[in-house]
């Protein structure tokens, strides 16, 4: 029996590449020089797409594959997949939730600590001789006991809140409604009000057209010149222009960011700022989690092509 034809949109770690190739006829879209011609020739044979959360699959790509049955996303976010196009053609969509929750939450809290305590600057202070020549490193700000806001109390938001409790922080959250199991957390429906009562605002909600720029100028202004924004969700949830303006003017105290518009080519204005911590979209970037994500991508494909229930369906 012929292997199902899979269109691979972006590279995976080697262990996932090998496992995917063992069971499928994989064609690497990201290596094609003329992607339009590549899709025109291969599209009718494609039964599945293996993609990454930030790459997704747009309507044009989906329509180029008339026999497409499933899109398996390597990542928890699926906002870059045109779900409307998939619904129109009854195409299944899956993602890889749960397996990355704790690593993403770990990085969010680490970013808060690193930014507030100036750890990258302190490392440079030692390495460039400033400690020996200039004396003590400038004082930074504490984390424990301060006020945290969690914008989006889903899996990752809950995991962040659990960790913040260990720092004796006063924690509030915004979500679609109060959560019955959010013991010890204050519910604040309005993101502006949440930002106003927060020293640190964590953005952890899933991205959708409804959440685009939910962190807007008003939210950023409410967080204020002493506040810090930490985004471990999707870049589209934050108005990046408003964020840059606030960071440059001092209207916002600081930011710690793992996601950006147009990444990996980010706005060069970020490079000139000393009040922002920049990370290269690595919140789920541990060997253990990436192996689990790759396995779940393949488990969803295998379940579909064998007629079994999908482990983690989106559609």
Image (cartoon, grey):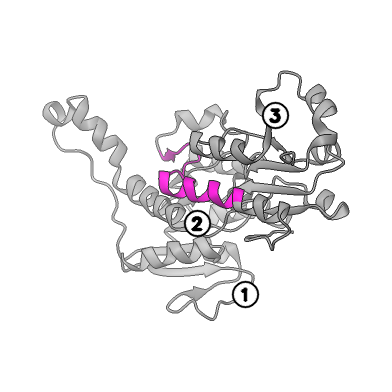
- The residue drawn where x is 47% and y is 70% is 172
Question: Which residue is labeled 3 in the image?
Answer: 29
Q: Where in the figure is residue 307, as x and y percent of width and height?
A: 73, 58
Q: Taking 223 as reference, is 302 left or right?
A: right
Marks 2/1: CA–CA distance: 25 Å
Quadrant of the snapshot with the N terminus: top right
Question: Closer to the N terminus: mark 3 or mark 1?
Answer: 3
Q: Is residue 278 magenta?
A: yes
Q: Is residue 148 magenta?
A: no
Residue 80: quadrant of the picture: top right
Marks 2/3: CA–CA distance: 26 Å
Question: Which residue is labeled 1 in the image?
Answer: 177
**Which secondary structure, mark 3?**
helix
Marks 3/1: CA–CA distance: 41 Å
- The residue drawn where x is 42% and y is 78% is 184
Magenta segment range? 275-298
Using the image as rendered, state which of residue 142 and residue 226 is in the foreground. Answer: 142
Q: Relative to residue 211, is residue 71 depicted above or below?
A: above
- The residue drawn where x is 25% and y is 34% is 123
**Which secondary structure, mark 1?**
loop
Judged by depth in the image, the label closer to the viewer, 2 or 1, is 2
Using the image as rendered, state which of residue 111 and residue 295 is in the foreground. Answer: 295
Is the C-beta separation of discs 3 and 1 under 8 Å?
no
Q: Taking 90 as reference, is 216 left or right?
A: left
Judged by depth in the image, the label closer to the viewer, 3 or 1, is 3
Question: Which residue is labeled 2 in the image?
Answer: 99
């Amino acid at each position: 029996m012929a292997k199902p034809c899979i269109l691979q949109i972006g590279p995976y770690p080697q262990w996932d590449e090998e496992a995917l190739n063992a069971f499928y006829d994989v064609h690497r879209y990201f290596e094609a020089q003329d992607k339009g011609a590549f899709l025109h020739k291969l599209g009718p044979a494609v039964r599945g797409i293996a993609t990454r959360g930030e790459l997704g699959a747009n309507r044009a790509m989906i329509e180029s594959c008339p026999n497409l049955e499933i899109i398996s996303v390597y990542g928890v976010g699926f906002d870059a997949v045109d779900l409307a196009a998939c619904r129109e053609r009854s195409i299944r969509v899956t993602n890889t939730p749960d397996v990355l929750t704790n690593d993403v939450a770990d990085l969010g809290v680490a970013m808060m600590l690193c930014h507030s305590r100036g750890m990258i600057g302190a490392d440079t202070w030692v390495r460039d001789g400033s400690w020996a020549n200039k004396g003590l490193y400038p004082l930074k700000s504490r984390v424990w006991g301060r006020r945290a806001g969690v914008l989006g109390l889903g899996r990752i938001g809950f995991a962040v809140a659990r960790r913040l409790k260990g720092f004796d922080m006063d924690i509030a959250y915004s979500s679609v409604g109060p959560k019955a199991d959010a013991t010890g957390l204050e519910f604040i429906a309005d993101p502006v009000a949440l930002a106003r009562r927060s020293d640190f605002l964590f953005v952890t909600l899933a991205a959708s057209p409804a959440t685009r720029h939910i962190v807007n100028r008003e939210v950023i202004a409410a967080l204020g010149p002493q506040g810090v924004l930490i985004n471990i969700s999707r870049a589209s949830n934050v108005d990046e222009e408003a964020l840059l303006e606030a960071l440059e003017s001092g209207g916002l105290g600081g930011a710690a960011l793992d996601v950006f518009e147009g990444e990996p080519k980010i706005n060069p204005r970020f490079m000139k700022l000393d009040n922002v911590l920049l990370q290269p979209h690595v919140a789920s970037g541990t060997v253990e989690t990436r192996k689990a994500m790759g396995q779940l991508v393949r488990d969803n494909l295998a379940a579909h092509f064998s007629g079994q229930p999908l482990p983690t369906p989106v559609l």
